[in-house]
Amino acid sequence: MAERIPRVPVREQDPKVRATNFDEVCFGYNEAEATLEASRCLHCKNPRCVGACPVGIDIPGFIARVAQGDFPGAASVIARDSSLPAVCGRVCPQETQCEGSCIMGVRFEPVAIGKLERFVADWTREHPDKAPAPEVAPANGHKVAVIGSGPAGLACAGDLAKMGYDVTVFEALHKAGGVLEYGIPEFRLPKDSVLRHEIGAVADLGVRFETNVIVGRTVSIDSLMDEEGFEAVFVGTGAGLPKFMGIPGENLNGVFSANEFLTRNNLMKAFRPDYLTPIHAGRKVCVVGGGNVAMDAARTALRLGAEVHIVYRRTEAELPARREEVHHAVEEGIVFDMLTNPVEILGDEKGWVRALRCIRMELGEPDESGRRSPVPVPGSEFEIPTETVIMALGTSPNPLIAKTTAGLETGRRGGITADPDGATTRKGIFAGGDAVSGAATVILAMGAGRRAAAAIDRYIRG
Amino acid sequence: MYKIIKKEMLNPTVCRMVVEAPRLAKAAAPGQFLIVLTDSKGERIPLTISDYDPEKGTVTIVTQKIGVSSCNIVAMECGDSFAGVVGPLGKASDFMEMPLEELRKEHFIFIAGGVGTAPVYPQAKWLHERGVAVDVIIGAKTGDLLIYKEEMASVCSALHICTDDGSEGFHGMVTALLEKLVAEGRKYTRAVAIGPMIMMKFTTLTCRKLGLPVTVSLNTLMVDGTGMCGACRVSVGGKTRFACVDGPEFDGYEVDFDEAMRRQGQYRTEERQAIENQGRA
């Protein structure tokens, strides 16, 4: 076999430097690096990567164009299936999706599909004159409301607008983007350069954005349909409610949900001195949890100047976070306290956190998810002195819409009941993304938004 | 959007603004609040809704200068626009769900402290317009800090004023005036207290002594106001509740006020720093 080109490494900010700033960690490929990496693709007859992509992007197709230096062509191929390539190239868990299925990965390193997707999106943004013009069908006069401007809503709105629908997106916060805006930090997904551009591209399709509208409070789904003439509604309100552990001391000063901590820093830009919203990290922070949100909160606290520990009840092998995030967190100096579970938060005489009381865990039998479930080691309690505790234990769907919309049913975990195409128990109302599934990934939400757009089109055309 | 169409100073530190927010004005109810954002770099500040006019599409807010953000709000003028106004948030007052014939058997006493007087107004008005008996106590440190006297007088059967220094009305705190009114033979069946956390705490203690059920409106820290962040966590009846979605009104007897006051001061260091920074700038 001919000598293989090794996976082209991607340039990143030095860990010591980036631990003190909020600039993006990864610089991405340049044209030469991208073209070289693209040449590694084997162009399998039955590309497994496409099947492993929740929105089914023609991965070998776009990579072939990158290899030929036809970057606008590559962008056109991706645009057929994804409206947020610059986001997905940065935040998708490629190792369990496209790259995890890449045949190159069996003997070598998989093709860097995520980095190539990101390259194409970034190149397109930096060369607006060469970007492919989106194809938008003539206006068909039908109005559709999309609730929530996160990944599911943006994908649904983008597809509907391309089909000619008159789409309005309602957003509860003052800025569009949902979790991409309030949840994912600047150092993973730059807001002004990358996210604003991708949302702008959706707006360019003719989608209207109305911020500061809380559906269920400011207006109801029924008033949108009965009084404002929306023929169908897509609910993509995500999973925004934070979970707490229910242990003593959780209401002490210095205990925050990861949502609060990240919203202050991302949406409200607390890290910038010219913004007014305060944030409190202190000298030492314990983040409880092992997912992407835990990594984001930990790395944010680190950048605010704290010593940071991640406290997780299983082992590193079970961490649900993207591998790249864990790797970056370790590089930056985050301490991982594995097989450790908090049992109480201890406060000082003024009601501020002074320590996290934990118990050591060991792995027992595998549970329903196939992961070995952690069990406490009796008598192994100990204290980790800390100023701040951030709970990153997952989130659940906001019940507001279901509560204020008669006939809209929810399931066991609070998610809206919907079929795979997003049809709910109410005619004309569709739902998808985390609002249905509970907290999952950006790309799964996008996929759900796109399927719902197709279903809404079928519904309206009868 | 969100244009200030009227602004007046009610006293040297408190201002009232009428702001364009048509969707919000149509949906608002007594007891609810809203969040304003002065500009893209500002804080999201929760404020109670002091009035709303669905026809004109406006809401009325009352703000007291305390920190940097509230000063920025008060510094805005007629014709200026907020970067964002969102709401109505939280639940409407409990009494709105009671049948009118039941409500008309009640005699409400509202106890309003300082800037907390403003959100009492729409509640008293709503009840008074429906023929429900309403008395109101307004308390302030000094007579010149009293707000909403005339407005309130027009929406209640009896208005009682008190000041800490005795410069106007009864000389003493709202709690002492409440006890005095009850001792004089006035029979109240329900109390609603809105004002500083410490005032609501002591009013609740007095109400308990008088055997009077009391509702309080908690002005906790908040970021989004929709249940996402949990900054507004309060212990109510031993359970953690979110003031933004489960409140802002709760049964006063059940609220852990000491915890609520402690949590309210969580960013005091940062707030002081911000005031100093602004002084230097």
Image (tube, coloured by chain):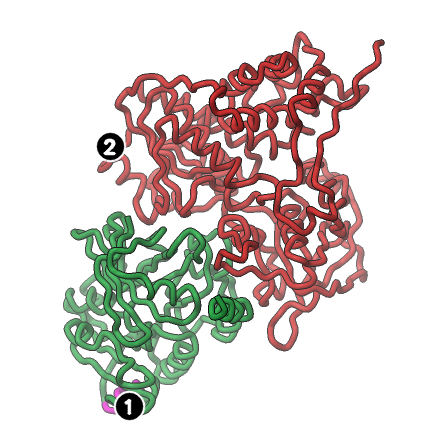
Chain colours: A red, B green
> Is the residue A407 above or below the residue A308 in the image?
above
Mark 2 Cα shell of 10 Å, populated few (<14), some (14-19), many (≥20): few
Mark 1 Cα shell of 10 Å, populated few (<14), some (14-19), many (≥20): few
Question: Is B118 displayed left or right of A191 in the figure?
Answer: left
Image spot of residue A283 (x, y percent): 68, 63
Outermost residue to the front:
B281
Disc 1 marks a residue whose amino acid type is Lys
Element at label 2: loop
Q: Which of the two residues, B266 or B135, is positioned nearer the viewer here?
A: B266
Magenta-colored stretch includes residue B180:
yes
Which residue is label 2 attached to? Answer: A229
Q: Quarter of the image for the C terminus of chain A: give it.
A: top left
Instruction: Name the chain letter of the residue that bears numbered label 1.
Output: B
Q: What numbered label is drawn on residue B211?
A: none
> Is the residue A372 above or below the residue B278 in the image?
above
Q: Quadrant of residue A231?
A: top left
Disc 2 marks a residue whose amino acid type is Gly
Image spot of residue A86 (x, y percent): 55, 30
Q: State the predominant SS element of the stretch in magenta.
A: helix
Q: Which of the two residues, A399 or B38, is positioned nearer the viewer here?
A: B38
Question: Is B39 displayed left or right of B27 in the figure?
Answer: right
Question: Is A102 displayed left or right of B169 in the figure?
Answer: right
Instruction: Name the chain letter of the residue that bears numbered label 2.
Output: A
Q: In this rendering, does residue B221 appear at all?
A: yes
Image spot of residue A144 (x, y percent): 32, 29
Element at label 1: helix
Q: Quarter of the image for the N terminus of chain A: give it.
A: top right
**Residue visible at 24% across and 64% down in the picture:** B7
What residue span does the magenta drawing correspond to? B177-184
Which residue is label 1 attached to? Answer: B180
